[in-house]
């Protein structure tokens, strides 16, 4: 049973939420405002919020008839009858409650409006799959990912450590880059699920524009992310240029594999895309330290 719940957390996707906090911390270090405890609080909140979103996605997609047994993607415990819908629903809201508890402790370091920001983040963690207009069902999942896995975590992580918006120019640049790379993880997910999503009436960007177009978008997102970071690279030691070079080599290799595979064979590509993002954010962090 523990293994089933671990699968439901979708560990391969968690580097996406971790990367945003790492990038935001790198921005704080560039401002000489690094604080370990606020950074760890942001990390815990981000991971819990993503797990809650993953649980909610599984529950609400089952409830709305989107998922079916034997799907090409990762196993869904609820769909396979291994986890009851009620248990998954409880897990979703309990995980959100845990995220809220962590978020409240951020008030020790941040202003009152962090409560509002946290509430919005948790609302959209559910709105991705739930509500009258689920974002992931109407071609808005990619935009939501750019905002809530890029712009929001990077900028707020940096702000919580620096207590100033002076970090915004650097943080926003890194945030947009991180968001674009995070959206690539969703592209792979939807690229794999094209046939299932089409049959279920789920309007992802891959359903709307097709695999060929979104494959090109995947490649261009990686290039654009590194180009957007140009002002930041100029503020770092020359060896920091190894960060975009290393990422682009990994990115191109993953993109070529993406184009050649279909179905369940794309699951490792999803994991590689998430790891590429984590490598980028970690190398960026190291370049701000060394």
Image: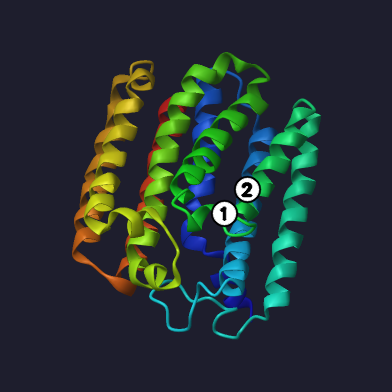
Residue at x-position 72% and y-position 55% = 96
Circle 1 residue: 128
Q: In the current view of this chain or complex, which residue is farthest to the top?
A: 166
In the foreground, 85 or 264: 85
- CB atoms at circles 2 and 1 under 8 Å apart? yes
Instruction: Tell me: residue 140, above or below residue 158.
Output: below
Q: Could you tell me how far apart the alpha carbons at marks 2 and 1 are, in whole angstroms?
A: 6 Å
Circle 2 residue: 124
Measuring from the top left, give residue 210's x and y in whole percent. 27, 57
Q: In the current view of this chain or complex, which residue is farthest to the bottom?
A: 81
Measuring from the top left, give residue 201's x and y in whole percent. 44, 67
Q: Is residue 278 visible?
A: no
Measuring from the top left, give residue 223's x and y in whole percent. 26, 36
Is residue 78 shown left or right of residue 142?
A: right
Instruction: Tell me: residue 79, above or below residue 239.
Output: below
Is residue 157 shown left or right of residue 198?
A: right
Residue at x-position 37% and y-position 53% = 205
């Amino acid at each position: 049973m523990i293994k089933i719940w671990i699968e439901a957390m979708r560990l391969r996707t968690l580097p996406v939420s971790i990367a945003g906090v790492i990038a935001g911390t790198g921005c704080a270090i560039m401002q000489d405002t690094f604080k370990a405890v606020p950074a760890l609080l942001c990390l815990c909140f981000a991971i819990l919020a993503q797990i809650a979103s993953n649980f909610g996605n599984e529950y609400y997609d089952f409830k709305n008839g989107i998922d079916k047994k034997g799907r090409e993607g990762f196993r869904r415990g609820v769909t396979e009858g291994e986890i009851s819908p009620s248990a998954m629903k409880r897990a979703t809201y309990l995980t959100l409650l845990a995220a809220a508890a962590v978020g409240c402790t951020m008030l020790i370091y941040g202003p009152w409006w962090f409560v509002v920001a946290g509430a919005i983040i948790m609302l959209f963690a559910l709105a991705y799959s739930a509500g009258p207009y689920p974002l992931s069902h109407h071609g808005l999942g990619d935009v939501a990912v750019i905002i809530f896995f890029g712009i929001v975590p990077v900028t707020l992580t940096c702000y919580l450590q620096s207590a100033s918006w002076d970090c915004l120019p650097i943080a926003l640049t890194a945030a947009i880059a991180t968001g674009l790379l995070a959206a690539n993880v969703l592209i792979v997910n939807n690229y794999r699920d094209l046939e299932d999503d089409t049959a279920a009436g789920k309007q992802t960007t891959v359903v709307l524009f097709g695999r060929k177009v979104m494959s090109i978008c995947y490649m261009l997102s990686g290039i654009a992310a590194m180009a957007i970071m140009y002002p930041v690279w100029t503020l770092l030691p020359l060896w920091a240029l190894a960060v975009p070079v290393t990422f682009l080599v990994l990115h191109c290799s993953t993109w070529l594999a993406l184009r050649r595979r279909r179905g369940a064979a794309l699951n490792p590509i999803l994991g590689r895309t998430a790891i590429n993002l984590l490598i980028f954010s970690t190398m960026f962090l190291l370049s701000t330290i060394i």
